[in-house]
Amino acid sequence: MRRPVLLLALIALVLGALATGGPRADARATPAPLAGLEAPIPAQLVPGETATVSADGDPLRIRAAPGLQGVELTQAPDGTVLTVLEGTANADGYAWQKVRFEGIDGWAAAVYLVPSGPPAPEPVEPTPVEAVEPAPTDPDPVCDTRGTPPGLFGDLPTQGGSALVVWGGGTTAGIVHQAALRGVTLRSVWVLNDAGRWTSYIVGAPRFVNQRWFDHFPGGRIPSPTALFAIAEPRGTGPATGSIALPVTTANAPRHSGGPAPEVEAAAVIVVDAASGKVLHEHNARTRLPPASLTKIATALLAIEGSDLDAWVSADGDYGMLDPDSSLMGLAAGDCFTVRDLLYGLMLWSGNDAALTIARHVAGSDAAFVSSMNAFVDRLGLADTHFVNPHGLHDAAQFSTAYDLAMLTRYAMTLPTFEAIVGEHSWTTSGSEVILMRTLNHFLSSYDDADGVKTGFTEEAGKTLVASATRDGRRVIAVLLNAPDRSSAAATLIEWAFTDHTWPR
């Protein structure tokens, strides 16, 4: 009966080995959110007064931002007194209050705070006037890059069997992909839950089989760092890559009930029903062409699945290979943003510098990231796509097809984070600079049902577009390559798809 104790000790040793001197977040998931996402902070929590932690004997986590898992500043033991500060927010189903504990300012779930009145006055010696210093100004955002870096840490069982590993944050699909990059096909991964019991994810099993896993990790995101046990297939018993291609089915596919598709000016076109994968219309859809910034769809996918979105990233400023007239987020050496901010800079502003910064953060180098991109599209079964950079600036060896890009986007739109980013009209960063970004995707504002996705342009590729729209719960994806009037053409094709097709009820 000593095995659970030994496993916990191993986990503690691995997490300790990853420490870099800064505070680390608890690997456990946040408790189930309370009802009422927009519940206000209780009025009795008065800034300048104090509150007592009431958490049924458990310590209260003080976070760097409201609901921000993975960036825990400290823990306040049950019964201790905190100072209430100005600042309230709602996130992850909780009302959050800004507080101060032992000189550290952070955020705590207000439901675990009981008001305890004004702080007791402390006797102070009078300070001579000449010794008074000016009040400090608010500091700039802290770029704390000391957290566990992206990826899997530990020796994977390349010959089959099990091993203890630590995950640097992302999704379960990201764990499987990182293992595949090392030639390992995972059978399952296991994590200790808050009750000290093991919860598993069975690779390739239906969601209902893995429901306890997703209940443990709300939203499907696994915080950094999380200790896991990985169970691998013996070498030679299956493909190391592990296909993730979404099935194409006719079971619930729409039926054509109207006239032919309208003609539009484009080198290649495809219209696809997202749910079934059925092709509704295509023209030169399997012809290899330069994708331009549609490349960034794959870049965003790898970042979303393989990193902590709230991790801080410091830009290295090494962007000399980029055309200064190309799309840029405007990063300079030392600029500090979260992965989330960089993803908005990548997808809304099509920042080529954001693409390189993301690639280096996620994989360590441009080359390693590109290798991961190609492994990823191979696992999706996209045989006519090859990448040589993460941004899409022209290279004769970088190509894709309208069909491959539609299938890539079909997968991408199953990820809630990706879907939210590409459907956003604007975003304001909260890093070392405040940058207001508005999407370059004109289709998003010109078509009523539009909800994404990405534009692109180079002289060689012409204007490119992946467009998505959803009506009555049905999503249609259109891809146009080298299309001079891409937004209008996409709207025409998607409107035809909705009006000239009927979906089973």
Image: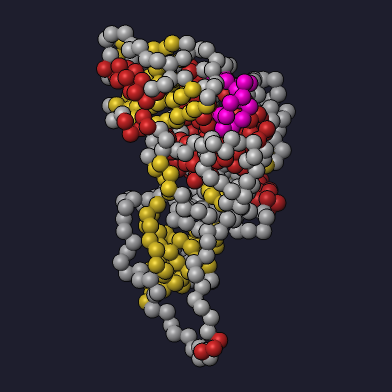
Residue 128: where, in percent of width, then height? 53, 91
> What residue is at 33 percent from the left and 27 percent from the top?
470
- Residue 377: image quadrant is top right
What is the count of numbered marks?
0
Q: Is residue 229 magenta?
A: no
> What residue is at 62 percent from the left and 41 percent from the top?
319
Residue 346: where, in percent of width, then height? 50, 38
Q: Nearer the viewer, residue 229 or 283?
A: 283
How would you classify the magenta stretch by its main secondary structure?
Answer: loop
Residue 106: where, in percent of width, then height? 48, 63
- Residue 95: image quadrant is bottom left
Q: Nearer the viewer, residue 40 or 489?
A: 489
> In this picture, which residue range is highlighted in magenta?
385-400
Above or below residue 438? Residue 503 is above
> What residue is at 44 percent from the left and 72 percent from the top?
83
Q: Nearer the viewer, residue 10 or 332?
A: 332
> What residue is at 50 percent from the left and 58 percent from the top?
63
Image quadrant where one finds the C terminus: top left
